[in-house]
Amino acid sequence: MDNYKQHTGRLGEDLACEHLINNNFSIVYRNFRFKTFGEIDIIAERKNLIIFCEVKKRNTTQYGGPLYSISKKKIQTLKKTAQYFIINNPSYNDKKFTYRFDLLAINQDKEIEWIEDIIR
């Protein structure tokens, strides 16, 4: 089961990266980890905008849409991991950058729903 989840996750991230690149973003990092605390699926950049992307690939809507999978705990984890990234990457630790958290939801037909600014 874990291999299936990993494969599904990797496929979703590949599709999300392709979508971001097609929208003029460059991929800065994939699967950025902060110790064992947290992970950001994709960090991407376009001009002065850095987006921290959570990718959700769902083969069913049985348990609700992808937004339902973003818990308060997950939000805290994303924020802390993004802060760690910014602090430890001086080239991105600059006031000229705007930061945003986005969700890229991929359904069973590989259609992508891009929800911007999921954390305010």
Image: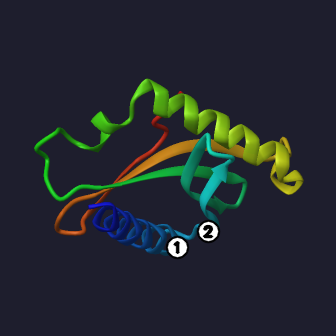
Callout 2–callout 1 Cβ contact below 8 Å: yes
74 to the left or right of 46? left
Q: Nearer the viewer, residue 33 or 89?
A: 33
- Residue drawn at (56%, 51%) of the image: 40
* Mark identifier at residue 27: 2
Identify the secondary structure beneath mark 2: strand
Of the residues under marks 2 and 1, which one precedes in the sequence? 1
Identify the secondary structure beneath mark 1: helix
* Mark identifier at residue 57: none
As drawn, the residue found furthest toward the right would be: 90
70 to the left or right of 79? left
Rendering coords of residue 46 (x, y %): 65, 62
Is 13 drawn above or below residue 79 in the view shown? below
Q: Amino acid at mark 2?
A: Ile
From mark 2 to mark 1, how far is it between C-alphas?
A: 7 Å
As drawn, the residue found furthest toward the left would be: 62
Rendering coords of residue 47 (x, y %): 70, 60
- Residue drawn at (63%, 56%) of the image: 32
Report which quarter residue 5 is drawn in.
bottom left
62 to the left or right of 48? left
Q: Nearer the viewer, residue 119 or 48?
A: 119
Is 57 drawn above or below residue 86 in the view shown? below
Q: Amino acid at mark 1?
A: Ile
Rendering coords of residue 113 (x, y %): 31, 54
Report which quarter residue 108 is drawn in.
bottom left
